[in-house]
Amino acid sequence: MKFTVLTLFPEMFAPLNESILKRAQQGKLIEVELINFREYAMSKHKNVDDIPYGGGAGMVLKPEPIYAAIGDLPETVGSRRIVLLTPQGEPFKQEKAQEWSQLDEIVFICGHYEGFDERIRYLADEEISLGDFVLTGGELAAMVMIDAVARLIPGVLGEEDSAVEDSHSMGALEYPHYTRPRVFEGMEVPEVLLSGHHMKIQAWRRKESLRRTFFRRPELFAELEFSPEDYPLLEELAEEYPELAEESWRWEHLKPKSKRRRPKKSP
């Protein structure tokens, strides 16, 4: 998969050449191309911004350099998505990362300064925001999104199940993790994780995932779709927490139905 980034500050993307993303590029699993769209500026001094019509503070990115840079992109064999990074865009979520991981190329347009000429929007297939806050430019947002998408590409992570079990990938937050030492500062590793009983470990992890999601991200818990296997775990949690018991109507329909006894035939 290819990530193409239009930016005025390509040197900011040094973190992409470290750790997992570095290995993914070396292994030809992903490709990252940084395009400084200042090179497409038409003025003598390579100006990419100008004062806004109607007045106001700050400078606005001009449309010509970005249009020229997009127009100069080589044809792609597969699917390409052009994404404008802006605080006004749709919030970036795990579902979007999963959707993008199926593409062949994503082109990020990183804004800067006060904003960009409105006509630049017509280049984009999507407008995406990292969150409800404002950054000095789209570079940091682009790096976060590249990382989130790249780790979903087969082979990028060491184990195929790693991305699947991450927080948000399954709709719930991830369960707690432990490693050596067994006891640290008086805190012990839960006994079930030392049992070697894989089914019990799996049930414990799911239960802790549900517990953590309910208390830390109740809005995510409200959107979870439970499986029949979740029912006994939810019942156990409801016994521990009265506030969770109030949510029991959401999984009552999963409770196994009791079998009716057939009436005995009269002699």
Image: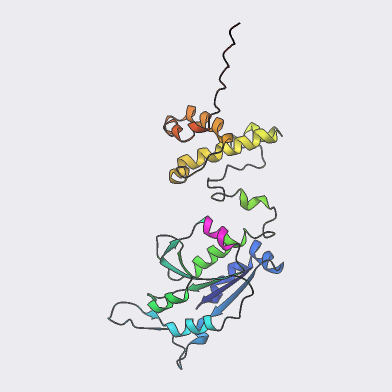
Can you see residue 212? yes
Quarter residue 2 falls in: bottom right
Nearer the observer, 45 or 180: 45
The magenta-colored residue range is 95-101
Would residue 106 appear left or right of 159 to someone viewing this image?
left
The correct choice, above or below, for 123 with respect to 193 in the image is below
Q: Indicate the quadrant containing the C terminus: top left, top right, bottom left or bottom right.
A: top right
Q: Residue 204, how many percent across, how many down?
A: 60, 35
Q: Main secondary structure of the magenta part?
A: helix
Q: Residue furthest bottom?
A: 44
Residue at position x 56%, y 30% in the image: 232
Q: Nearer the viewer, residue 16 or 74?
A: 74
Q: Quadrant of residue 151?
A: bottom right
Q: Is residue 183 above or below residue 131?
A: above
The answer to whether any part of residue 186 appears in the image is: no
Image position, residue 233 (x, y; %): 55, 32
| As drawn, 71 above or below 92 | below
Numbered disc total: 0
- Visual colour scheme: rainbow
Q: Residue furthest front?
A: 267
* In the image, farthest residue toward the left: 54
Q: Is residue 100 magenta?
A: yes
The single residue placed furthest to the top in the displayed view is: 267
Q: Quadrant of the N terminus?
A: bottom right
Left or right relative to 86: residue 171: right
- For image coordinates 69% across by 64% down, the residue present is 23
Percent position of residue 205, x then y: 60, 38
Q: Is residue 31 positioned above or below 46 on the image?
A: above
- In magenta segment, residue 251: no
